Amino acid sequence: MIHYTNDAPLPKTMPAVVCRGPQDYRLEEWRVPEPGPGEVVIRVKSVGICASDLKCYLGAPLFWGDEQRSGYCQPPVIPGHEFVGEVVALGAGAAEKYGLALGDMAVSEQIVPCWRCRFCTRGQYWMCHENEIYGFRQKAFGAMAEYMLFPSNALNYKVPPSIPAQHAVFIEPLACSIHAVQRGNIEFGDVVAIAGAGPLGLGMIAAARLKHPRLLIALDLDEQRLEVAKACGADMGLNPRKVDAIDAVRTLTEGYGCDVYIEATGHPAAVEQGLHMIRKLGAFVEFSVMRELVTTDWTIIGDSKELNIHGSHLGPYCYPIAIDMLARGLLPMEQIVTHQMPLADFQQGIDLVARGDSSIKVTLEP
């Protein structure tokens, strides 16, 4: 039995942004999903535009394939993996399974695990072999629509009503940021450098602050973003356009370099920068989805410095922490969410993110 808000069935169709190919996103009428057993339908309140959404839109090889790999995106698909919405329909057993009720605000983890593969059965669900992630694959349509379905194998969470919808959109990127910081194994007294003060980098700075490093350095080419980074907890900001950032960090650390470097720019130059900025036996965390291949001197990692290189993917086990951080007001969300616009203006939103000169987090309101 399906439970609906006010016992009223959902409409048959809805407006949705549909990805049909690189730079071919259209606002269309789409069928409203109906929940099966264990499934949840939300009315989307807000959805963010992520840097990976932009890279998919622009045709990055990771999403569309090249001579080395097949593409990850499966058009036609509704994009959008940063979202929050009101529960409006619950399939049989869904309320009990997730602790959700009609009218609750809810979010779902970006990945929808299969729970059968080697990784899922070992608790490493974020590396699920089937790779079903909202907004890119046809088994998990995203949130750039009026309504959205959470499949029965999704991981869902109730969001406190005290968190505004446009701020709750930040739960997903903040969870990813927290996981990246965890991968860095930051110790008391460490000097930590975080490259990129976009939404994810800002979340990393806020999370790293809670680890109590001796010095927390933000790196970005935009002065305004560096100011927001300080509001998130950075002790200082360095703009590589204006200073020799590698030399500055070495000077701050008696010539050794930073203990932990987290890359969150998505630009190959930041990888090279980090390899030279980090000390011997340091920890390098790579988070970004790169638009192009990275070429660097691999010898630095082994023979020169014996670095610990850690990848970071998604935000496993971090959503409750992210929700708590937002509920406690630990981030300056009014400075991070810079633009809110109707779903119909999605192209304007994508263009804003692409320019990157006046926005940090852009959200769409269906």
Image (cartoon, helix red, strand yellow):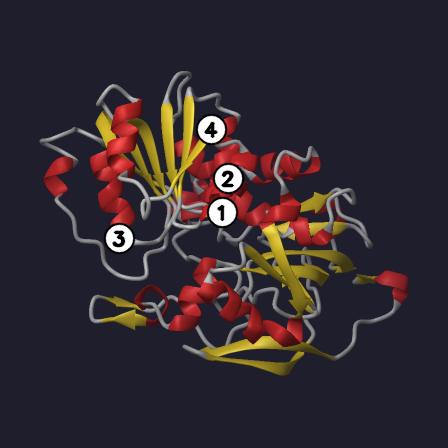
Left or right relative to 148: residue 199: left
Q: Is residue 181 above or below residue 223?
A: above
- Per the image, the residue denoted by label 1 is 225
Numbered marks: total: 4
Q: CA distance from mark 4 to mark 2?
A: 9 Å
- Per the image, the residue denoted by label 4 is 235
Q: CA distance from mark 1 to mark 3?
A: 20 Å
- Per the image, the residue denoted by label 2 is 229
* Of residues 241 and 58, the one drawn nearer to the viewer in this rendering: 241
Q: Nearer the viewer, mark 3 or mark 4?
A: 4
Earlier in the chain: of badge 3 and badge 4, it is 4
Q: Nearer the viewer, mark 3 or mark 2?
A: 2
Residue 184 visible in the shown view: no
Earlier in the chain: of badge 4 and badge 2, it is 2
- Per the image, the residue denoted by label 3 is 268
- In the displayed orientation, state which residue is furthest to the right: 6
